[in-house]
Amino acid sequence: MHANFTNPLPAGDGELFDLTKLKADGFDYYRLVPKQSFNGTYIVYIYGGGSMSENITPEHWSFLVKLATDTGCGLFVPYYPLAPTFYCRDVFQMLQRMYIDATRSYDVDRVILMGDSSGAGLALSLSILAWKNGLRKPEQMILLSPLLDTEFFDRNIEKEILYNMDRETNYFYSFELKEYLNTYWVKDYVARTEYT
């Protein structure tokens, strides 16, 4: 482990894994590998938070420890740049660099791209960019409740969300959120739907 390294794993789990803090484009990412039963598959897990909340939560780390333990997979977990300081271009520069480094620097049998919420949308975009840029393609994708189309390009989806918001409380949408995402996340990437 590096100097000044703060272990993000839940208490008691540190001895079960090799954990390495790495850098891509100046941002941290972690490599987490079970010390026993590692099967050669890596999951690139991109956590959600609307592309603007603080970095990964302790609940995410608890989930990731269980995921690695139950599957025998290693994980790469990026702490990607967040809005409003950064926007989607910065995030994809970092994610592509991390993905290239991770899949070329380690003995990786299989790659799975996985994420939740906005992280699932980023995982989908990263797979499209891997395909377009001739990078290694993931063998599998697992997208948990993906946030897609942050520009609300498809007006029918926006109308459906607005219609259902009156009937249910599990929708996270507002015109303010749409404006925030367009101002601080999309910026000059308007209509570049592989990113937004």
Image (cartoon, grey):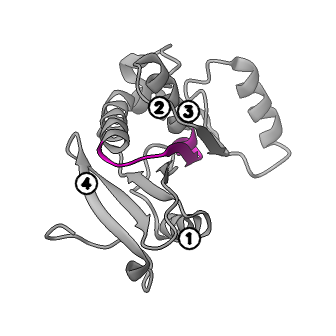
Q: Residue at x 43, y 25 (%)?
A: 186
The kind of residue tagged 4 is: Leu
| Magenta stretch holds residue 107 | yes
Secondary structure under the numbered disc 1 in the rendered image = helix
Q: Is residue 43 left or right of residue 89?
A: right
Which residue is farthest left? Answer: 3
Q: Which residues are magenta?
A: 105-120
Residue under label 1: 69
Secondary structure under the numbered disc 2 in the rendered image = helix
Tag count: 4
User: Which sits earlier in the primary sequence, circle 3 or circle 4?
Assistant: 4
Q: Are marks 3 and 2 in contact (CB under 8 Å)?
A: yes
User: Could you say which disc has been placed on residue 22 in the image?
Assistant: 4
User: Which sits earlier in the primary sequence, circle 1 or circle 2?
Assistant: 1
Q: Nearer the viewer, residue 30 or 37?
A: 37
Could you tell me residue 112's position as x and y percent? 54, 44
Q: Is residue 151 visible?
A: yes
Could you tell me residue 83's position as x and y percent? 37, 40
The kind of residue tagged 3 is: Leu
Q: Nearer the viewer, residue 180 or 21?
A: 21
User: Could you say which disc has been placed on residue 124 in the image?
Assistant: 3
Which of pointers 3 and 1 indicates the residue nearer the eye?
1
Could you tell me residue 13's position as x and y percent? 44, 80
Which of pointers 4 and 1 indicates the residue nearer the eye?
1
The kind of residue tagged 1 is: Thr
